[in-house]
């Protein structure tokens, strides 16, 4: 395999929290040397001048929906992989909310095979926690782990039967499996299209209180304490949930928490004239909540930033706001949207990549997410200052439902490497 030298780069290491100038050497898919002075072999080197641009660990995106099987017209592993590579995402962790749900080893094997055939990036798969994501009977967690599942989740279908959920969490704990949950009380949030408040009332939209998130969080924390399971909350989006989350972490529970890039960079007013591309689940929050979530990422209370990539076709979105499907694509816009927080001075680059790369790698036990010798050479080279206007029709995803369409952003991916192999050049 060709030895690759990336020289004259701004190196972002989220593990040490540093930003330095230097070079990085890749050999056999792993990082062999990194720093201001890198000794290189005498021959067979591919040397790339980074021209002072930023070199960081590739993004690991937890909670990506790829619509195979069942809805391939919305997104395939090929198009999702291409979108990920173009966005600097080197590992996507897919959700099991497909048709049918990924709840058997056979369905899981199908998705893994399709991903290996079609996607240029790493693809890891989560399986359903209950059969059919119906909340009545847990899946064969042990067999699914053996088949390669990296975690278990029913996604936005919250398990309401606490006895079923307790059994599933206890069994997952006995096997060391990771469970991901969606903290929303299903009764309160059913049919909601906005966050309750003056704005939702003026727009006449069915709304849900932020307390629906807090209530579900409290319930799940109690069950986590009872079972001792490894648990990840997929999206914390409101300040009401943060004190409970902090107490749970301080009490030593094995909990991590994530948030979506849309809840970090948008608020309820972006819905404006009933723009359905801004309809996501949970709904966009008040600006005060958005700022509190940004602070929680900076402080490390919220561990992970994800795209919550959810493709929807035009027919699903060209409906009245309350009837339109929820979700937005985000694989290609995750990095430039996150860089909004860098340019605003809210987060520095090491902190951003701690949440985008290092913490997801730690939670999943991956040898990636850091710029250290021996780590997997999954890398993104980007210009954080390059301006561009998002054109949804130029996105690699099959579905074009991005809330950032027509938005002026900063941050262009120049190259993406997966195990030292270049999978994208911008």
Image (spheres, rainbow, N blue to C red):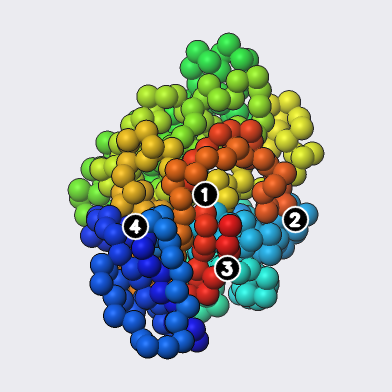
The reply to whether dot 3 and dot 1 touch (C-beta < 8 Å) is no
Query: Camera-side residue: 350 or 314?
Result: 350
Which of the two labelled residues, at mark 4 and mark 3, occupies the earlier sequence position?
Answer: 4
- In three-dimensional space, the C-alpha distance between marks 3 and 1, rounded to whole angstroms, equals 15 Å
Q: Nearer the viewer, mark 2 or mark 3?
A: 3
Q: Which mark is residue 10?
A: 4
The reply to whether dot 4 and dot 3 touch (C-beta < 8 Å) is no
> For residue 270, which quarter of the picture?
top right
> For residue 247, which quarter of the picture?
top left
Q: Which mark is residue 423?
A: 3
Label 1 sits on a secondary structure element that is strand
**Which residue shows up at 32% across the image and 35% down it?**
345
Q: Which mark is residue 412?
A: 1
Q: Is residue 16 left or right of residue 289?
A: left
Q: Which residue is mark 2?
A: 71
**Which residue shows up at 46% across the image and 61% down it?**
380
Label 3 sits on a secondary structure element that is strand
Instruction: Check the image and report above or below for 287 versus 244.
Output: above
User: Considering the image in quadrants, where does the C terminus appear?
Assistant: bottom right
């Amino acid at each position: 395999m060709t030895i690759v030298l990336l020289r004259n780069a701004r190196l972002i290491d989220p593990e040490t929290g540093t930003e330095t100038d230097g070079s990085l050497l890749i050999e056999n898919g792993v990082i062999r040397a990194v720093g201001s002075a890198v000794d290189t072999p005498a021959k067979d080197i591919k040397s790339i001048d980074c021209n002072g641009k930023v070199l960081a660990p590739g993004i690991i995106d937890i909670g990506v929906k790829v619509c195979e099987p069942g809805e391939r017209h919305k997104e395939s592993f090929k198009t999702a992989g291409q979108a990920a590579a173009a966005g600097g995402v080197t590992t996507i962790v897919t959700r099991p909310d497909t048709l049918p749900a990924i709840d058997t080893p056979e369905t899981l094997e199908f998705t893994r095979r399709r991903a290996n055939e079609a996607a240029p990036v790493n693809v890891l798969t989560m399986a359903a926690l209950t059969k059919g994501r119906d909340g009545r009977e847990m899946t064969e967690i042990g067999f699914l782990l053996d088949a390669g599942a990296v975690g278990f989740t029913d996604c936005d279908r919250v398990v309401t039967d606490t006895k079923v959920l307790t059994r599933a969490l206890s069994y997952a704990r006995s096997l060391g499996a990771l469970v991901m949950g969606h903290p929303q009380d299903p009764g309160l949030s059913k049919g909601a299209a906005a966050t309750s408040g003056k704005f939702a009332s003026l727009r006449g939209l069915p709304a849900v209180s932020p307390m629906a998130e807090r209530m579900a969080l409290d319930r799940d924390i109690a069950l986590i304490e009872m079972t001792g399971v490894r648990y990840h909350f997929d999206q914390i989006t409101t300040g009401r949930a943060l004190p409970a989350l902090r107490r749970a972490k301080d009490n030593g529970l094995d909990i991590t928490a994530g948030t979506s890039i849309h809840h970090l960079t948008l608020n309820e007013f972006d819905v404006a004239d009933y723009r359905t591309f801004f309809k996501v689940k949970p709904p966009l929050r008040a600006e005060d909540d958005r700022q509190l979530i940004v602070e929680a990422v900076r402080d490390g209370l919220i561990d992970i930033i994800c795209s919550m990539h959810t493709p929807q076709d035009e027919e699903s979105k060209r409906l009245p706001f309350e009837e339109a499907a929820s979700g937005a694509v985000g694989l290609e816009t995750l990095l430039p949207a996150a860089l909004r927080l860098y340019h605003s001075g809210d987060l520095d680059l090491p902190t951003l990549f701690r949440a985008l790369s290092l913490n997801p790698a730690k939670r999943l036990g991956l040898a990636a997410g850091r710029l250290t010798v021996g780590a997997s050479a999954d890398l993104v080279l980007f210009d954080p200052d390059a301006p561009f206007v998002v054109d949804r029709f130029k996105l690699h995803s099959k579905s074009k439902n991005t809330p950032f369409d027509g938005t002026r952003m900063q941050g262009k991916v120049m190259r993406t490497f997966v195990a030292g192999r270049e999978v994208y050049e911008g």
